[in-house]
Image (tube, grey):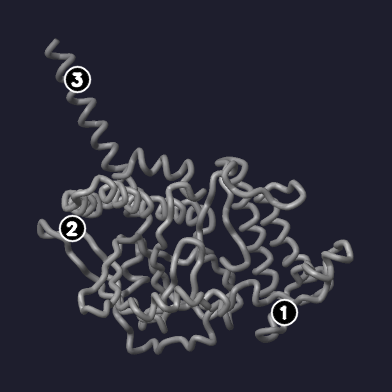
């Protein structure tokens, strides 16, 4: 009996050691080198990149009247990275932002330009019913300690202990799980396309808004930040010169255009660069197919999520969300979602007309 008890203790030690190694592997590999690549301090040798050279979608910057009123009454001022140190809430990495630094928004985040050539992405409030919270979110929920650092788990417990309402505790739990989910999404794509994915640091942030009565309004929310790179969204290279086949009424009211790549809009692109862009697009296609066939996940990749750097004409991906196949909206005409994305990319590649060009 004693031998069995000792053997069980040995098994438990081995199991615990494996769990620690598993945790360390994910977080350490995920964030390896990020502290050097994403320095929080402004460098005197790197002046701010002019906004006209950034991939900014002006249509996303426009807000409705009520949103504008809210932002004028409660303007954003800064974000801190929150963690747990010295037995208390610890705030570090002061990141000043103002409404004039707002450069865009997606379905899940607000994006602000930082003074030292980085962007800060502040998570929007989302409901648990959103399709992003599918199977991967369940995986994160079951093993949260794998996707969060020890100090982040301690911060979660510390903040929840300060809550009086059970709903507030549940909301914090949801936000920390979302932070882990964001890391997992990034990990999925980083493994498949390491050189095309922009280095991204994820953290739990506290956003501050000014108030008329002088007491700041704070929100705990998942955040991430990336380097700013000069370039343009893929859709800004589109040349609308050929309509798709539609009935006369649709063609007049809601015309659809083939996605032809305008190789002259931002300067002459060498054929060698076009070939490299086409090659990397094919890598994106294969990654999309892999996720769909092997993991039943849809890579939410659109022309707004891809940047072509200028003047290098290098392709980069800066947004990485994946959805459960059965939760993602199907494409038109019964086409599967991943094939719809792939067809869009193929339209760009075909418009390069590389077969007609010579070095």
Picture quadrant where residue 282 is located: bottom right
* Residue sitting nearer the eye, 186 or 135: 135
Indicate which disc residue 84 carries: 2
The C terminus lies in which quarter of the figure?
bottom right
Indicate which disc residue 140 carries: none
Left or right: residue 128 compared with residue 196? left
Q: Residue furthest top?
A: 1
Q: Mark 3, residues whose alpha carbon is within 10 Å: few (<14), some, or many (≥20)?
A: few
Secondary structure beneath disc 1? loop
Inter-mark Cα distance, 2 to 1: 50 Å
**Which residue appears at 85% of the width and 62% of the height?**
246
Q: In the rendered image, which residue does mark 1 sit on? A: 263
| Residue 314 appears in the rendering | yes
Left or right: residue 64 compared with residue 283? left
Among the two numbered marks 3 and 1 on one chain, the one whose residue lies closer to the N terminus = 3
Among the two numbered marks 3 and 2 on one chain, the one whose residue lies closer to the N terminus = 3
Q: In the rendered image, which residue does mark 3 sit on? A: 7
Left or right: residue 109 compared with residue 236? left
Look at discs 3 and 2 and give the one toward the viewer: 2
Q: Are marks 2 and 1 in contact (CB under 8 Å)?
A: no
* Residue sitting nearer the eye, 230 or 194: 230
* Residue sitting nearer the eye, 105 or 145: 105
Q: Mark 1, residues whose alpha carbon is within 10 Å: few (<14), some, or many (≥20)?
A: some
Image coordinates of residue 224 in percent, x first then y, are 38, 65
Look at discs 3 and 1 and give the one toward the viewer: 1
Image coordinates of residue 345 in percent, x first then y, are 69, 62
Residue 334, placed above or below residue 259: above
Inter-mark Cα distance, 3 to 1: 68 Å
């Amino acid at each position: 009996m004693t031998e069995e008890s000792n053997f069980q203790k040995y098994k438990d030690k081995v199991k615990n050691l494996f769990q620690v190694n598993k945790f360390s592997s994910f977080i350490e590999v995920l964030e390896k080198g990020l502290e050097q690549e994403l320095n929080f301090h402004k460098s005197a040798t790197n002046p701010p990149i002019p906004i006209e050279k950034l991939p900014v979608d002006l249509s996303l910057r426009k807000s409705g009247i009520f949103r504008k009123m809210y932002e004028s009454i409660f303007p954003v001022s800064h974000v801190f990275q929150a963690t747990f140190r010295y037995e208390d809430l610890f705030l570090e990495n002061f990141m000043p932002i103002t409404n004039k630094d707002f450069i865009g928004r997606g379905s899940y985040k607000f994006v602000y330009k930082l003074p030292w050539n980085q962007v800060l992405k502040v998570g929007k409030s989302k409901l648990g019913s959103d399709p992003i919270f599918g199977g991967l979110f369940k995986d994160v929920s079951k093993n949260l300690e794998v996707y969060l650092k020890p100090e982040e788990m301690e911060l979660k417990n510390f903040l929840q202990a300060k809550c009086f309402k059970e709903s507030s505790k549940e909301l914090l739990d949801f936000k920390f799980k979302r932070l882990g989910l964001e890391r997992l999404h990034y990990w999925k794509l980083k493994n498949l396309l390491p050189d095309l994915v922009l280095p991204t640091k994820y953290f739990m942030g506290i956003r501050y808004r000014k108030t008329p009565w002088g007491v700041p309004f704070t929100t705990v929310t998942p955040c991430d930040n990336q380097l700013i790179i000069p370039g343009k969204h893929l859709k800004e290279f589109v040349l609308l010169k050929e309509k798709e086949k539609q009935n006369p009424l649709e063609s007049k009211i809601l015309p659809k255009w083939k996605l032809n790549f305008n190789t002259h809009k931002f300067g002459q692109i060498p054929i060698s660069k076009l070939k490299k862009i086409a090659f990397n697009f094919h890598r994106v296609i294969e990654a999309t197919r892999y996720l769909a066939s092997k993991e039943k996940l849809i890579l939410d990749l659109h022309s707004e999520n891809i940047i072509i750097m200028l003047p290098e004409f290098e392709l980069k991906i800066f947004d990485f969300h994946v959805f459960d196949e059965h939760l993602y909206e199907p494409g038109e005409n019964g086409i599967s979602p991943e094939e719809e994305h792939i067809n869009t990319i193929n339209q760009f590649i075909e418009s390069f007309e590389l077969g007609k060009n010579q070095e």
